Amino acid sequence: MGKLILQRLGLGVVTLALVSVLVFAGTEILPGDVAAAILGQNATPESLAALREQLGLDAGAVSRYFAWAGGILHGDLGVSLANRQPVADLLWPRFLNTMALAGYAAIIAVPLAVGLGILSAAWRGSLFDRIANVVALATVSLPEYFLGLLLILFFSVQWGLLPSLADTWSGMGLGAWLQATTLPMLVLVLVTVAQIMRMTRTTVLGVMDQPYIETAYLKGIPNGRVVLRHATPNALAPIINVVAFNLTYLIAGVVLVEAIFNYNGLGRFMVDAVSKRDLPMVQAAAMVFAAVYVILNMIADISAIALNPRLRHPRSKEA
Amino acid sequence: MTLRIFGRPLPISAAIGLIIIAATVFLFIFGPSLAPFGQEDVVGAPFADPSAEHLLGLDQNGRDMLSRLLYGARMSVGVSLTAVLISFAIGVPLGFLAALNGGWPDMIGARFVDVIMSIPVLISALVVLQSLGSSLPVLIGTIALLDSTRVFRLSRIVAQGIVVMEYAEVARLRGEGLWWMLRREILPNALPPLLAEFGMRFCFTFLFVAGLSYLGLGVQPPFADWGGMVRDNQQGILYGLYAPLFPAGAIALVTIGVNLVVDWALAGRTMVQGENR
Amino acid sequence: MSANVLEIRDLRVEAPNGAVLLHGVSLDLRPGEVLGLIGESGAGKSTIGLASMGYGRGGCRITGGEIRLVGTEMRSASRPQREALRGARIAYVAQSAAAAFNPAMRLDKQVLEGPLLRGMPEAEARAWMLELFRALQLPDPEHFGERYPHQVSGGQLQRAMIAMAMAGKPDILVLDEPTTALDVTTQIEVLALLRDVIHRYGTAALYITHDLAVIAQIADRLMVLRHGREVEMGPTAELLENPQQDYTRQLVSERRESLGATADVHHRTGETLLSVKNVNASYGSTPVLHDVSLELKRGETLAVVGESGSGKSTLARLVSGLLPPRAGAVRFGGADLPPRFRDRSADQLRRIQLVYQLPDVALNPRQTVGEAIGRPLAHFRGLTGKAQRDEVARLLEQIGLPADFAARLPSALSGGQKQRVCIARALAAEPDLMICDEVTSALDPLVAEDILRLLRKLQDDLGMTYLFITHDLSVVQRLADRVMVMSKGRVVETNDTATLFAAPRDPYTRRLLDAVPQLRTDWLDEVMAARA
C-alpha cells in the first residue's frame, strides 16, 4: 500500500511539471511576437524592445521555460507587467482570501451534502428523496450569478440584512468578515451541495445494489444499520472522490462568485490580469489554481487507496 | 395514460424538459426575426420599466430587453452548440480509435488528456484567451478543444467496454477493417451513453460560455448574448430592478430543460440494467 | 400450532414489470426436513426461497397467497417482525459467497452481527461460531474470523457463509445453489459438510438447484418447478426412479444419459488438422500454460477438460491467435500458423472459428440475426444480396431455426436460440475447425443437450472438427472422441474418452471423475466412505 501511495505522489509531481509546461506553452508560444500581441496597437518600437527584454524573449522558449519554472520552485513568480510589483506579493494575500472563502463554503457544504445524499439514498423513493432530487437538479442548473443576484436582491436590497459587496481587508474582525462573505459563501454552498448530494446518493445506491446488502437484509439487520454499517463504509472511497471532484469545481466556481460580489480573491485577480494581458500574473495564478486542483485529486486518490480493504489487509495474511 | 417515448414512460419532469428544449430550438432559429427592435437600437431611458411596448423593459443603455434576449438566444445557444459539436467531432473518433488500436498512441493520448484535465477548464480557457484575445473563433475553438478532451475520455472508456465484448472479438478475428469496427460494432452500441453525454456537455458549455461572457471575456459587444447581458445589467439589481434576472433566468431555464431530459435518459438506462440482474 | 416450520399456500409473485414469476405454489416443510426445489432458470426456485423470508428481490412483489413461517404470516407481518425472524428462524445462503460478504468487514463481525443484535451474549455467540467453523472444517478456526473475505478461498468463503447462516440457530436454511459456483472437486467437500451440519443440528432446508444429481444426495423430498408452477413433488428416491410427469422424465433421463452414455467414437486415422507443440504462454508475467502439446485429426472431437485456472480457455485463445505463445509452435492444415491473428491470412482466419460460452455477449445487440450471419458470408465468401439471404436461410434451417428469425435482434431470442445463431455464424465461414469454449455452460440442461445434439449432427453431416473446452465431464462423455485433462496450466493426461473414464491413469483425473455427482441418492455416502 505504501508503494502505491508513493507512486501516486510521484504521479502528482509529474502531473504538476507537465501542467507547468502546458501553462507556459499556452501563454507564451503564440503565433507571432508575444510582446507585440500583448501591447497590441499601443506598441512603439521602444516599448516593444523594453517588453522583449523584460520577458527575456531573446532567449529560446526552452531556456525561458526553465528560468520561469526554476523561479517558481524558489518562490519567485516574476514581476507584474501592469504595475511592476513582484507577482508573489500581489498573489499570495488574494490566494489566502480565496481559500478562506472556499473553506468557509466547504465546511458547511460538504457535511450537509453528504448527509443529505446518504439520507435520500436510505429513503430511496420517499417524498423526501423525490423533493431533494428535484431541488438538487434545479440548483445544479442555476448559474452562480443567477443565484447571486437573487440573494443580493432579497438579502441586501429588499431586506437589508447583508452587504451586496464582499468588502474585506486585512485585520478586520471575524464577525465583520463573516458578515461580508456570507452571501458569496451561500452561493458556493448552493451550487456545490446539490452536486455532491446527487453524486453521493448515486454512489450509495450503487453500493446498495450489491449482493452483500441483500445478505444483510436477509440476516434481519434493520435498514438504518444496513445503510450505516454495510453501505456507507464501502461507499466512502467513492464519496471522497465525489467531494474532491466538487471541491475542485468550487475552486473554479470561486472565480465567478468573486466577480459577482467583487471579492478580492485570486479569481478576480486572474480575470483582471487576463483583461490587462499581464502575462506573468496569469501564468502564476493559473499555476496556483492548477496546483490546488492536482493536490485535491491526489488526496482523494490516496484516501481511496488507504480505504481499500484489499490493500489494507493484503492476501499474504492468508495461512 | 402516460405518454411513452422509445417504449419508456415519459415523466412530467422530462416532458417539461422537452418543451423547454423545443422552445429553445425555436428561438435559436427564429429569435432574431421575432425581435420587435434591433439589438443595438436605443429606444428609451436606461432601465425603463416594462410597458406594453417593451414587455421586459429596457436595459442599462435604454435598449429593448426582449429584443436583446431574442437576439442573444441565437448567440448563446449557437456558440455553445457549435463548440460541443466540434468537440464531439474531434473527441469521439479519436476516443474510438484509441480504444480500438490500444498500444502507445492510446497510452500517450490518455495521459495527455489526463494532464489537460488536471487544470480546471476555466483556468485553461483564461490562459488561452489571455494570449489569443477573445474573438468568436478563438472562443469556440478554445472551448471545443478543451471539451474534446472530456469527450475523448468518455468515448475511449465506452469503446473499451465494447471492444472487449466477444462480438467485437469475433469481428476482429474475422479480419474486419477499421471502418467496419468503428461504424458497425462500436458506434451503434456507444450511441446511448454518448447522446446523454452530449446533453450534459451542452449544459456545461452553455453555462461556461455564459460565465465567460459574464466575466467580460466571452462574446464581445456589440453582440447580445445572455451572459454578457447579465453583466451589463447587474447594477440594476442594486436598485431592486429585475433587469439582470431576465437573461440569467433564461440561462437557468435552458440548462434545467436539458438537464431534466438527460436525467430521465440516464435513469432509464440504470433501470434496464437492474432488471437484467 | 402446526408441526410444519414453513407452510406456503398459493404463493403468487410478480416482477416490477408485471410479469408473473410464481402462479400459486404451495408447499410444507417439516422440522429437519430438506426439500429440494429443482428447475431451469426462470422456474421461480429462488423466488420461492426469498419469498419464504418475506423478501422480494429487485422490486418483485408478493401479490397473493400465504407464507406461514413458524406460526407467523410473513405477508401481514410488520417490518420489525420480519426482521426478528430473518436470521433467527430462517437464514439464507447465496450462490456466490464472494459477492454476499461485505468486503470491508471482518468475517467474524459479519457472522456474529445478527446474533449479537438479537441479544445473544457475545461469549456464547463466539463459542457457537467456533463450533460451526470447526464443524465446517475451516482452517485455523480460532483465528479464521479475523480475516477479510478477500483473504480466503472460494470454497472457504462458501463454508463461512453457511456458518453465518447457522449463527442465529435458525429452524430453516434457504440454500440458493450453494455449491454451483464452485469447482467440481470443491463442490463435493462443501456438499458433504453442509449435509453434516444440517443433519447434526436438525435444521430444515429449502435447497434450490438446477442439478438433479446434487440434490439427490441431500434432499428428502423434491419439488420440480417450471415457469413458476409446480410440475410434481415427491420423495427423492421415488421421484428419480419413477417420475410421473413428462418434464420430470426428460430432466431425469437427460441427467442419466449425460452420466452414462458414451459417444460413438470416431477413430480418425486421417490427416492431422491442428497440432500444438510444447507451447508456453503467459498473461503479463504470470505463466498460464506450461509445455502444452496436442494433436487433432480432421473430423475428430478433442475435449480439453479442467477446473477454473487450468489454462483450458487460454489454450483456445492461443489457437485462435488472440494470445501469442511465449514458446512452442502451432501448425494448422500442414502449415505453420502465425501466432497473432493479425498476421494470419484471410483463409486461415476463415478456417478456424470460435463459439463462446455466453451467447449474450457474443452477438452484437444492434445487429439482426441476418446481419450477424450474413457478414461472414460477405466477408469470406463474397455473397451479397439474394445469394446471401438464401444462404442465411439455409444456415438457419441447418441449425434448426425458422428462416424469419433473420429479421430479429438478439434481444428477441432465448439463450439456446442465441447459441444456435452463434453456431450458424461460425458455420457461415465454412470452417475446418470449430473451437467451442464452454458453449453449453450457461444454458439450462435440456437446452444444453439440444445444442450438443446439434453439434454432433453437424459433425456427422459436415465432418466438422471440434476443439471442445469444458469443465463439465458429463458433456465430454457424450461428445468427445478423446479427452485432454489439464490442471494448473499443464496437461495431466490425454486418452480416448472411454479409456480415460474407465481407467484414469493420473490421480488428479481420478479425483476429477470421482467428484462428478451421480444420479443415485447414495453416491455421496459412497465417495465419502471411500475417502475415509
Image (cartoon, rainbow, N blue to C red):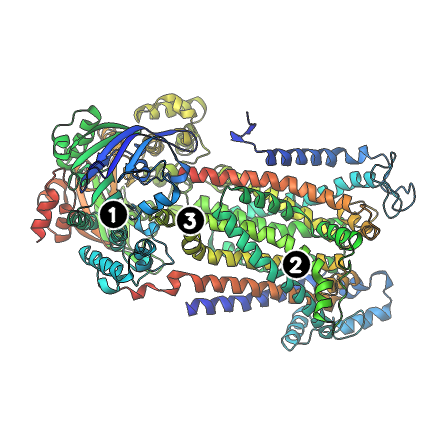
Residue at image position (74%, 61%) is A271
Q: Position of residue C512 (x, y in %)?
A: 16, 48
Is B81 left, or right, of C247 in this rendering?
Answer: right
Q: Position of residue A33 (x, y in %)?
A: 76, 63
Determine which residue is flagged by label 2. Answer: A252
Name the amino acid type tagged 1.
Pro
Q: CA distance from mark 3 to mark 1?
A: 21 Å
Determine which residue is flagged by label 1. Answer: C170
Q: Helix, strand, or loop for circle 3?
A: helix
Instruction: Place residue A112 in its image quadrant.
Output: bottom right
Which mark is on residue A223? Answer: 3
To the question of a shared chain for discs 3 and 2, the answer is: yes
Q: CA distance from mark 2 to mark 1?
A: 57 Å
Q: In front: A117, or C38? A: A117
Q: Residues within 10 Å of mark 3 (few under 14, many from 20)?
A: some
Against C102, residue C412 (above or below) is above
Q: Position of residue B89 (x, y in %)?
A: 61, 44
To the question of a shared chain for discs 3 and 1, the answer is: no
Q: Chain of mark 1?
A: C
**Numbered disc total:** 3
